Amino acid sequence: GYDLFESIMPVVGGVGVYRSVAALTHVFADSVFLDGIFVFTGILATGLLEGHSLRRHVLPNLRNVYFPTLKASVMTSGLLMPLQFLSFRFLPLQLRVLSVNAVDLIWTAVVSFVAHGGDIEGSRS
């Protein structure tokens, strides 16, 4: 994804204000376009890897938790946007993935917590 963003609107090689606008565009595209895909595939893959039936558990669970989880994802992404902006604006392309992955640890923890209904102990009824 980041290579595609860079090929469409490069931060590297740009100058001044253009680099900042390009970095903001990358952060926006990452949050708007990729978050929904990541939430969907995360819930789907987690349910299947936990051994649940696709029809009986995973799809109904996806219907129940997708939008609340996406909302939490967008809110978390909004809070983390300044860190992502700094990553996209000042780090070379080869270090962005590492930086964004570090930020995504926080995002993943929040999204997982919401997707599992805030179940800290794992003891659902």
Image (cartoon, grey):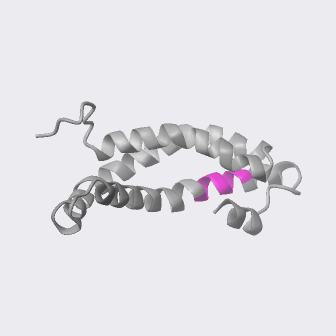
Residue shown at 74% from the left, 53% from the top: 21
Q: Residue 92, image x and y in percent? A: 80, 48
Q: Does residue 105 appear to the left or right of 52 in the view shown? A: right
Q: Nearer the viewer, residue 73 or 97?
A: 97
Query: Is 27 included in the stretch rendered in magenta?
Result: yes
Q: Does residue 88 appear to the left or right of 102 in the view shown? A: right
Q: Residue 5, image x and y in percent? A: 69, 63
**Magenta stretch in the rendered image:** 23-29
Residue shown at 58% from the left, 56% from the top: 30
Residue 26 placement: quadrant: bottom right
Q: Residue 24, image x and y in percent? A: 68, 51
Query: Is 97 included in the stretch rendered in magenta?
Result: no
Residue 56 placement: quadrant: bottom left
Q: Does residue 117 appear to the left or right of 36 in the view shown? A: left
Taking the view exactly as shown, the residue that stands out farthest to the left is 125
Q: Residue 33, image x and y in percent? A: 52, 62
Taking the view exactly as shown, the residue that stands out farthest to the top is 121
